[in-house]
Image: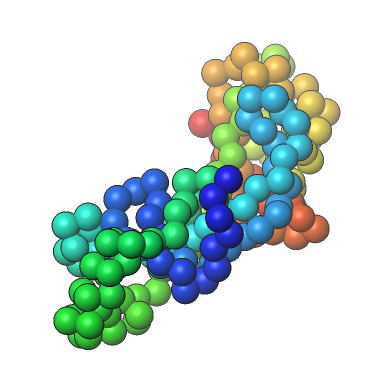
């Protein structure tokens, strides 16, 4: 497991470049996509300062803590030198406000009653926040969750909304 990081830390992430952590969502529970079992996760939110070639490359992303490593050694020295030589660029970076990042959950569903898309969407609670486990129960209760269908029910957790240790999702639509 990667070391613990906190807002303000400089890191490398799964995307290339030099990133600064601005948020850490620690210890929320979710479902492992392979086993279906409950697991505890930490997600790191970071904004990129420069690319691998040390060119301005502002962007935001989030990823599991496992893909993050604090900058040390030569990369950290390069970063500090770049900041010392480019105050204006660093000021722009500090003023950069990352966009909200949502988490999506796409549930493959069946439609044994051959309902229209509109009828299926009417069955879903629109504004009620649900954890992944509650979504699974809902789809089971509706008879839609055999995972062999060719439709997808999409749920979104805006800005990784979390309560009670779980990400909360809202129904977005069926495709």
**Which quadrant of the view contains residue 58?**
bottom left
Colour convention? rainbow
> For the point 17% across and 64% down, which residue is it?
55
Residue 28 in picture, x, y percent from top left: 71, 52
Above or below residue 164? Residue 77 is below
The quarter of the rendered structure image containing the N terminus is: top right
**Which quadrant of the view contains residue 32?**
top right
Q: In the depicted view, which residue is nearer to us: 158 or 127?
A: 158
Residue 153 in picture, x, y percent from top left: 60, 34
Does residue 162 appear in the picture of this structure?
yes
> For the point 62% across and 52% down, which residue is it?
42
Q: In the depicted view, which residue is nearer to us: 44 or 31?
A: 44
Relative to residue 7, is residue 19 drawn left or right?
Answer: left
> For the point 27% across and 61% down, which residue is it?
74
Above or below residue 59? Residue 133 is above
> For the point 47% across and 73% down, which residue is it?
8
Residue 95 in picture, x, y percent from top left: 34, 81
**Which quadrant of the view contains residue 144?**
top right
Above or below residue 167? Residue 25 is below
Picture mark count: 0
Q: In the depicted view, which residue is nearer to us: 3 or 174?
A: 3
Residue 5 in picture, x, y percent from top left: 54, 63
Relative to residue 70, is residue 163 drawn left or right?
Answer: right
Does residue 123 appear in the picture of this structure?
no
Q: Which residue is situated farthest in the front direction here?
A: 73
């Amino acid at each position: 497991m990667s070391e613990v990081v906190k807002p303000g830390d400089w890191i490398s992430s799964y995307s290339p470049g030099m990133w600064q952590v601005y948020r850490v969502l620690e210890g929320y529970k979710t479902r492992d996509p392979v086993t279906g079992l409950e697991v505890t996760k930490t997600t790191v939110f970071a904004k990129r300062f420069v690319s691998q070639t040390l060119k301005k490359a502002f962007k935001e992303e989030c990823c599991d803590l496992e893909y993050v490593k604090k900058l040390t050694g030569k990369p950290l020295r390069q970063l500090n030198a770049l900041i010392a030589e480019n105050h204006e660029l660093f000021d722009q970076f500090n003023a950069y406000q990352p966009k909200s990042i949502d988490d999506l959950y796409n549930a493959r569903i069946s439609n044994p009653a051959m309902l229209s898309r509109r009828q299926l969407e009417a069955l879903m609670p629109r504004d009620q926040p649900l954890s992944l486990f509650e979504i699974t129960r809902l789809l089971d209760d509706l008879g839609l969750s055999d995972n062999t269908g060719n439709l997808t029910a999409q749920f979104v957790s805006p800005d990784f909304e979390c309560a009670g240790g779980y990400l909360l999702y809202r129904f977005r639509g069926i495709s």
